[in-house]
Amino acid sequence: EVGWTLVYEMGFYLLFGILLLAPARWRPWGLLAWAIITLIGNLAGGQNLSALAVHAFNPLVFEFLAGAATGLIFLNVRGDRTFGFILLAIGLVGLLMWFFSAVPFQDGWPRVLCLTLPSCTLLLGAAWLARAGVRAPSYLILLGDWSYSLYLTHLLTLVLIARLWRMAGLETLPSIILLITMGIASIIVAALTYFLIERPLLNLARTSRKRIFDRRTERMATR
C-alpha cells in the first residue's frame, strides 16, 4: 500500500506551494524554519498529539525538504559537467555502500540519515549533467517515464508474483530467481500502466487544458 507516502506528498505540496508565493530570497529561510519546527516537534514527541501531527513531525518530512533544497541549489548554482559527474559518483557510492552493508533497512531517522544525502547528491549531479547537455541513454529515460506507474503498482505486482510462485511450487528455487522475476514483472506492469493508463490520462488533461485556455482566449478577444 503506497497511500501513506501520498499523504506526505499532498501535505508537502500544499505547504511548499504556499512557500512559493513568498519572494525567492525568503524560500531557503522558509525551508530552514520548516526543518527546525519539524525537528523540534519530533524530538519533543509532538507526533503523538494527533493524526495530523504524526505526519507533520515525522522524520520522513526531511526527505521532502531535502528534495526542495536540492531544487533550490540546482536553480541557483551553476554546476558544470565535471562537478556533475563527481556528485553522481559520490551519490552512487553512498547508496551502494548502504546497500551492501549489513545494516538492516529501518524507517524513520535511520532511513533519513543513511539515504537522503546520497540520493540528493545523485539527483543534483544528474540534473547538472542534463543541464550541461549530457543525455542519459534512451532506455533510462523510458524507465524514468515509467517510474510513477512503477511506484503505484510495484507492491501489487510483488504480492501477485509471490503468490503465483507459491502456487506453482517454486519455493525450492534460489531466492535470486524470485527477485529477478519480481523485478522484471514490476517493470512490465509499470510499462503497461504507463502506456495504457497514465499517458492517455496525461494527454487528455493536456488537451482539456488547451481547450479551456483557447475558449478563454476567444472570449477575451470577442469582448
Image (cartoon, rainbow, N blue to C red):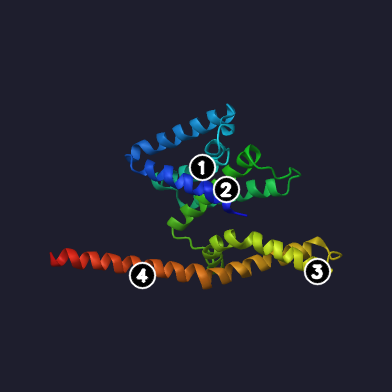
Residue 33 in the image, given as x and y percentages of width and height = 44, 32
- Disc 1: which residue: 66
SS under mark 1: helix
Instruction: Give the Cα distance between marks 2 and 1.
Output: 9 Å
Asked whether disc 2 touches disc 1, contact meaning CB atoms under 8 Å apart, the reply is: yes
Q: How many labels does the image show?
A: 4
- Disc 4: which residue: 207
Instruction: Give the Cα distance between marks 3 and 4.
Output: 45 Å
Instruction: Give the Cα distance between marks 4 and 1.
Output: 34 Å
Circle 2: is it few (<14), some (14-19), or many (20+) Cα within 10 Å? Answer: many
Res. 86 visible in picture: no
Q: Residue at x 48, y 60 (%)?
A: 134
- Disc 3: which residue: 167
- Disc 2: which residue: 119
Asked whether disc 3 touches disc 4, contact meaning CB atoms under 8 Å apart, the reply is: no
Q: Is residue 193 left or right of residue 74?
A: right
Asked whether disc 4 touches disc 1, contact meaning CB atoms under 8 Å apart, the reply is: no
Image quadrant in which you'd find residue 192: bottom right
Q: In this view, does 23 lie to the left or right of 10?
A: left
Q: What residue type is labelled 2?
A: Ser
SS under mark 4: helix
Image quadrant in which you'd find residue 171: bottom right
Q: Which of marks 3 and 2 is nearer the N terminus?
A: 2
Q: Earlier in the sequence, mark 4 or mark 1?
A: 1
Q: What residue type is labelled 1?
A: Ala
Instruction: Give the Cα distance between marks 3 and 2.
Output: 38 Å
Q: What residue type is labelled 4?
A: Thr
Circle 1: is it few (<14), some (14-19), or many (20+) Cα within 10 Å? Answer: some
Outermost right residue: 172
